[in-house]
């Protein structure tokens, strides 16, 4: 059996930047272990699989080591495949997922994710979190549904941060979001998730469900611009709307291929 596969760069307007994701459209679900093997073989931050349903599509995301509840950049990439390659002709596509219904629209080359807001609380950071960041002292630390949010003083601190990934991997969370005010955008961030098999994710849409409500409150504005300042980097336009976060980015197609399965 042959399966189509697409590799795309999300949250960027140029190739070899943003966050790469693989997308595998299916007619029906493969066994879970097969999808996990495909994701491991791809060795990208996420591989998205989707199947058609009566109301849209059902989407699932796998890192090289585990299935996750929510992934922004791979959802953006899946929407690109539907709109740009499969010629999906509706104004928005609805994905059913483990995080509920996720809608994506397309306007002027910008794809917009409509995700549920993450509710975060002030947290006492575990010792491993402090230890992994060594000399950097957080301004604030919060805990959302799956991630810690660590606020630093400046963009420079975020860019220069070099955490001990082995120690960081012992923090009980999906990952660690590190953020600060931006020099040319509203805020910057980085995302470390060794617990999920990803030392540092290039651009993390789902992390912005935590970042946007925090910065919207702090900056007293609901429309925000953001950079994820990983080596590849990514630019996002964000909007807080009640209990939803709209996250917009561009996508570029890198590769089209086929998977050979037994």
Image: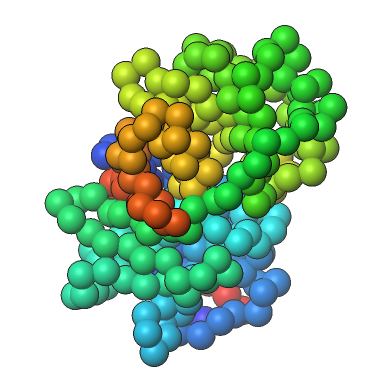
Q: Quadrant of residue 161?
A: top right
At a point 82% along the width and 37% down the height, the residue shown is 170
Residue under the image location 58 percent in, 69 percent down: 98
Please name the residue shown 68% across and 13% down the image: 136
Question: What percent of the width, then of the height, locates residue 86?
Answer: 26, 72
Tell me which corner region of the image, top left, top right, bottom left or bottom right, holds residue 222. top left
| Quadrant (top left/top right/bottom left/bottom right) for the C terminus | bottom right
For residue 83, above or below residue 232: below
* Residue 101 in the figure: left or right of residue 246: right
Residue closest to the eye, 40 or 125: 125
Q: Residue at x 75, y 14 (%)?
A: 134
Horizontal relation, residue 57 to residue 159: left or right: left
Given residues 175 and 230, the one toward you in this image is 175
Image location (x, y in percent) of residue 199: 66, 36
The count of marks equals 0
| Side of 93 where 142 appears, left or right | right
Q: Is residue 179 left or right of residue 9?
A: right
């Amino acid at each position: 059996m042959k399966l189509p596969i697409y590799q795309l760069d999300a949250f960027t307007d140029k190739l070899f930047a943003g966050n790469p994701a693989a997308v595998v459209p299916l007619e029906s679900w493969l066994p879970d272990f097969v999808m996990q093997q495909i994701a491991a073989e791809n060795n990208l931050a996420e591989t998205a699989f989707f199947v058609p349903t009566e109301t849209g599509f059902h989407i699932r995301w796998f890192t090289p080591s585990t299935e996750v509840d929510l992934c922004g950049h791979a959802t953006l990439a899946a929407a690109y495949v539907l709109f740009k390659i499969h010629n999906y002709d509706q104004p928005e596509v609805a994905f059913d997922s483990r995080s509920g219904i996720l809608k994506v629209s397309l306007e002027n080359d910008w794809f917009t994710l409509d995700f549920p807001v993450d509710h975060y609380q002030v947290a006492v950071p575990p010792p491993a979190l402090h230890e992994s960041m060594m000399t950097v002292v957080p301004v604030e630390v919060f805990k959302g549904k799956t991630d810690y949010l660590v606020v630093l003083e400046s963009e420079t601190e975020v860019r220069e941060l070099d955490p001990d990934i082995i120690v960081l991997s012992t923090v009980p969370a999906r990952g660690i979001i590190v953020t600060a005010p931006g020099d040319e955008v509203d805020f910057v961030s980085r995302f470390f998730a060794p617990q999920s098999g990803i030392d540092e994710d290039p651009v993390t849409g789902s992390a912005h469900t935590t970042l946007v409500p925090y910065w919207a409150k702090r900056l007293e504005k609901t429309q925000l611009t953001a950079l994820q300042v990983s080596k590849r980097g990514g630019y996002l336009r964000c909007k807080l709307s009640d209990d939803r976060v709209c996250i917009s980015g561009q996508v570029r197609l890198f590769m089209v291929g086929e998977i050979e399965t037994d």
